[in-house]
Image (cartoon, helix red, strand yellow):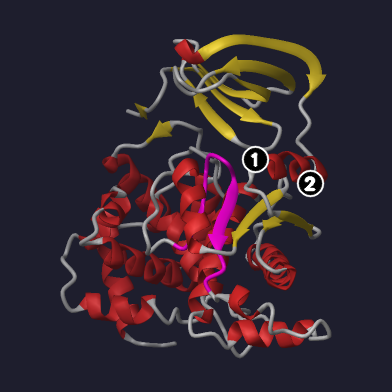
């Protein structure tokens, strides 16, 4: 049986009509006027509500002050509308840069924001082509894709604390399911060099400067990783707040993230050996318990435990790498199935395993094949 989270569901729908909800996050917060559509109406009259910007809010019934509906069709915000709206809520000093698919807010140098924009557009095209070549043509995003770039770690952490909670020093970027935006900071420390750069410096020189920094590989991997999460949820591979196993979600992002500092943009190779996760998984194989794969598939708990998270990420990358090469048709079918998941409905651990075996066969046999394949070191 399905477990219901957050609400007892009455129905799930992406309504075409526009709703207006006046509500409060808590007793002390000001009223918020949200204009958008109701995704889920709960039996207790609570809402899962999506604003025209793409942000999603779970609104408890006691927090709703007024709710109305009109007959106008739901229309997402344009990039320019989001640009105007978000600049009002971001700290002073932010600017907006528009690319064909992204709306990038930044208080970094414009060169750094432009470099990120080019990297994002490369990812956007490559991501779509990757799945298309495997028979899975992805829909275009319904909402503009938003990236927020901070110039300093201090300001990034202050913003993140209000946005998603305390992120700590180790997390240098994140994708928020709620806001649908990627937030990170300029790890390269480019701001230190901004005044030293000539106004005639070419963009290619700026790019080479960024990629020559000690943390360039980590910077590229983080941006690509979080932006891949964003594409998964905006190009039809998963539904936000749907029960998408974390190994699958992280596995795709890890599969795409591998930096290539020899490239002019710092990244281009999809599915190559991940320089961080591959050696981590090889080390893990020597002490890997027999039930490791079952634990990874049935629950997300290993990702949330500091003692096992590193192993979970490494195995997620390795499993995704293996399945996309040795079980590609089954993986694509599995991906199509996960894309149909409904918001707020969670599977039990047993259901997750049954679902996986429906597409890939016996878990025990697949685990043996998986380990044997990865031990060959055929990279």
- Image check: 218 left or right of 295? right
53 to 48, vertically: above or below? below
49 to 285, vertically: above or below? above
Q: CA distance from mark 2 to mark 1?
A: 16 Å
Q: Considering the numbered disc 1 on the image, is that residue within a helix, a strand or a loop?
A: helix
Q: Which residue is mark 1?
A: 89
Residue at left offset 66%, top offset 49%: 92
Residue at left offset 33%, top offset 87%: 376
Coordinates of residue 115 in the picture (x, y in percent): 70, 73
Give residue 54's quadrant in the image.
top right
Residue range (magenta): 172-187
Q: Nearer the viewer, residue 56 or 208?
A: 208
**Numbered badge on residue 79:** 2
235 to 201, vertically: above or below? above
Coordinates of residue 330 in the picture (x, y in percent): 48, 59
Q: Considering the numbered disc 2 on the image, is that residue within a helix, a strand or a loop?
A: helix
If you read the primary sequence from the N terminus, does the residue marked by circle 2 or circle 1 appear first?
2
Q: Nearer the viewer, mark 2 or mark 1?
A: 1
């Amino acid at each position: 049986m399905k477990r219901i989270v957050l609400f007892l569901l009455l129905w799930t729908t992406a309504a075409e009509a526009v709703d207006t909800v006046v509500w409060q996050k808590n007793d002390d917060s000001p009223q918020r006027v949200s204009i958008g559509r109701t995704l889920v109406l709960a039996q207790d009259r609570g809402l899962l509500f999506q604003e025209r910007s793409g942000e999603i809010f779970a609104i408890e019934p006691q927090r709703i002050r007024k709710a109305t509906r009109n007959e106008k069709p739901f229309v997402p915000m344009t990039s320019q509308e989001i640009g105007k709206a978000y600049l009002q809520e971001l700290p002073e000093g932010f600017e907006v840069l528009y690319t064909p698919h992204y709306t990038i807010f930044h208080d970094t140098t414009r060169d750094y924001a432009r470099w990120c924009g080019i990297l994002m557009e490369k990812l956007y095209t490559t991501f779509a082509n990757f799945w298309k070549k495997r028979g899975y043509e992805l829909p275009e995003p319904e909402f503009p894709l938003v990236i927020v770039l901070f110039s300093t770690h201090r300001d990034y952490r202050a913003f993140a604390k209000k946005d998603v909670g305390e992120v700590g020093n180790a997390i240098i970027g994140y994708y928020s399911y709620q806001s649908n935006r990627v937030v990170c900071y300029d790890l390269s420390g480019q701001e230190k060099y901004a005044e030293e750069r000539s106004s005639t410096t070419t963009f290619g020189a700026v790019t080479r400067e960024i990629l020559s920094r000690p943390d360039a590989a980590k910077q590229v991997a983080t941006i690509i990783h979080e932006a891949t999460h964003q594409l998964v949820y905006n190009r039809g591979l998963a539904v936000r707040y749907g029960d998408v196993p974390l190994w699958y979600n992280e596995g795709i992002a890890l599969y795409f993230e591998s930096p290539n500092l020899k490239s002019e943009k710092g990244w281009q190779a999809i599915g190559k050996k991940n320089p961080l996760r591959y050696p981590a998984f090889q080390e893990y194989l020597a002490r890997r318990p027999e039930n490791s794969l079952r634990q990874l598939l049935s629950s997300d708990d290993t990702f949330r435990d500091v003692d096992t998270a590193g192993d979970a990420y490494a195995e997620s990358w390795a499993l995704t790498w293996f399945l996309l090469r040795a079980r590609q048709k089954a993986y694509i079918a599995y991906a199509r199935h996960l894309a149909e998941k409904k918001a707020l409905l969670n599977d039990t651990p047993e259901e997750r395993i049954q679902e996986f075996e429906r597409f890939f066969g016996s878990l025990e046999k697949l685990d043996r094949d998986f380990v044997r394949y990865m031990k060959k070191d055929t990279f």
